[in-house]
Amino acid sequence: MNFSLEITILVLFLAILQGSLPVAEAQPDGKGLFTAYCSPCHGKGAIGEDPASPSGGFRDNGTLIAPALNGTAHAWHHGPEILFGYVKDGSPATESPMPGFSDKLMDDEIWSIIKYYQSLWPERIRKIYEKNYPGGFVE
Ligand code: HEC
């Protein structure tokens, strides 16, 4: 009888269980998460809630329009920690309808969402951002 194969399989199995073997870590799907949680207000592809008003602003009834996050509006003026806080804790603006997502999204999922919409920013904006916030792009 040859036990060595069985022992090898057992050792590998235990190593995986123990987490000592590098099993490829799944990256959260930033685009999919954005579409599920953010697009209802910020629009598909982060173009903003109202294409006629990408920078947001107010409706006639005084409620806020969700701005574009694709680099055509204002989001890129905020450093990564602020962008993270918007999602984790909700908008700091008291009259804002934007909720916090700390009960729905893990931190790495929030970062993946930011990474997704940062990837939509045009080159000109990327250069300014990199200068204002060195290392501010989510890897
Ligand atoms: C219920 C609607 C709603 C949802 C859902 C929502 N937002 Fe917002 N968000 C807004 C509105 C309205 C504003 C503009 C007013 C303000 O600053 O709070 C805003 C502002 C922001 C800002 C600041 C933008 C700027 O130009 O300064 C960021 C960043 C942001 N949202 C990200 C997100 C992300 C990422 C998600 C998904 C996880 C999300 N939002 C989900 C409505 C929403």
Image: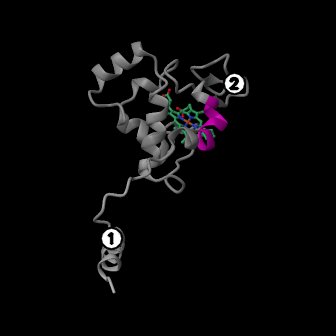
* Percent position of residue 12, x then y: 32, 70
Q: Residue at x 44, y 47 (%)?
A: 27
Image x and y of residue 75, in percent: 46, 26
Q: Please tell me whether residue 45 belongs to the stretch shown in magenta.
A: no
Q: Nearer the viewer, mark 2 or mark 1?
A: 1
Does 18 appear above or below 41?
below
Please state which of residues 98 and 60 is positioned toward the viewer in this rendering: 98
What whole-number distance in Å separates the C-alpha atoms at marks 2 and 1? 60 Å
Query: Which quarter of the picture shows residue 41?
Result: top right
Horizontal relation, residue 53 to residue 137: left or right: right
Amino acid of disc 1: Leu
Q: Earlier in the sequence, mark 2 or mark 1?
A: 1
Residue to which mark 2 is pinned: 59
Report which residue position mark 1 lands on. Answer: 12
Q: Which residues are magenta?
A: 35-44
Q: Is any part of residue 103 visible from this angle?
A: yes
Which residue is nearer to you in this view: 109 or 54?
A: 109
Residue drawn 52% across and 24% down? 70
Magenta-span inclusion, residue 36? yes
Can you give x and y, in whole percent of width and height, for residue 38 in the image? Answer: 59, 39
Residue 23 placement (x, y as % from top left): 36, 58
Q: How many marks?
A: 2
Indicate the amino acid at tag 2.
Arg
Question: In the structure shown, which secondary structural element does the residue marked by tag 1 occupy?
Answer: helix
Choose top left, top right, bottom left or bottom right for residue 42. top right
- When the figure is inspected, residue 131 is found, relative to residue 63, above or below; the finding is above
Ligand 1 found in image quarter = top right
- Residue extending farthest right: 61
Q: Residue furthest top?
A: 124
